[in-house]
Image (cartoon, rainbow, N blue to C red):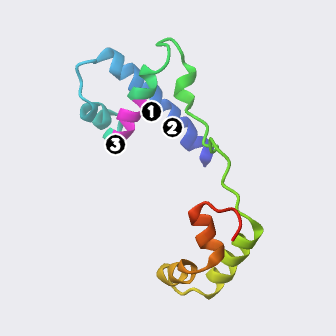
Amino acid sequence: MPEVCTEQWIADRARLRVLHLQHPEWTQCRLAQEIGRSRGWVQKWLRRFREVDPTDQTVIMGHSSRPRAPFPTYPEEVEAKIVSIRGRATCPSAAGARTKNDPVFSARRSGDASP
């Protein structure tokens, strides 16, 4: 199934590029209606097309979905505290209340490396 979606997505991007070149007077809403996509999708892809050379066909392949930066890491004591709170908390506000006066979390919020 993902291969079919990917092929359709690439086809939609290519069709958008062709329609935009053939009908520069069309609004983003009109392009979105013709392709069956949202105006936001059309806006995003027109911006990406403007950012590259007009002859560059690789742009229709899309961007990587890999995160640009690694996820933040926290000290083991902070992670252990989070795990213990998650195991006890019944709602997010309860977890927040437990961390408010905790020295491990207050030190992290203040930027102090040691609690």
- Ranked by sequence position, the earlier of labels 2 and 3 is 2
Depth check: give the residue in front, 86 or 79.
Answer: 79
Tag 1–tag 2 contact (CB < 8 Å): yes
Q: Are marks 2 and 3 in contact (CB under 8 Å)?
A: no
Q: Which of 6/60 is in front?
A: 60
To which quarter of the image does residue 7 belong?
Answer: top right
The amino acid pointed to by label 3 is Ser
Which amino acid type is shown beneath numbered disc 1? Asp
Q: Secondary structure at mark 1?
A: helix
Q: Is residue 61 above or below residue 110?
A: above
Q: Residue at x 56, y 83 (%)?
A: 98
Quarter of the view holding residue 112: bottom right
- Residue that badge 1 annotates: 12
Residue at the spot of label 2: 8
Q: Is residue 46 above or below residue 86?
A: above
Secondary structure of the residue carrying numbered label 3: loop
Q: Give residue 107's position: percent from left, percent from top.
A: 62, 68
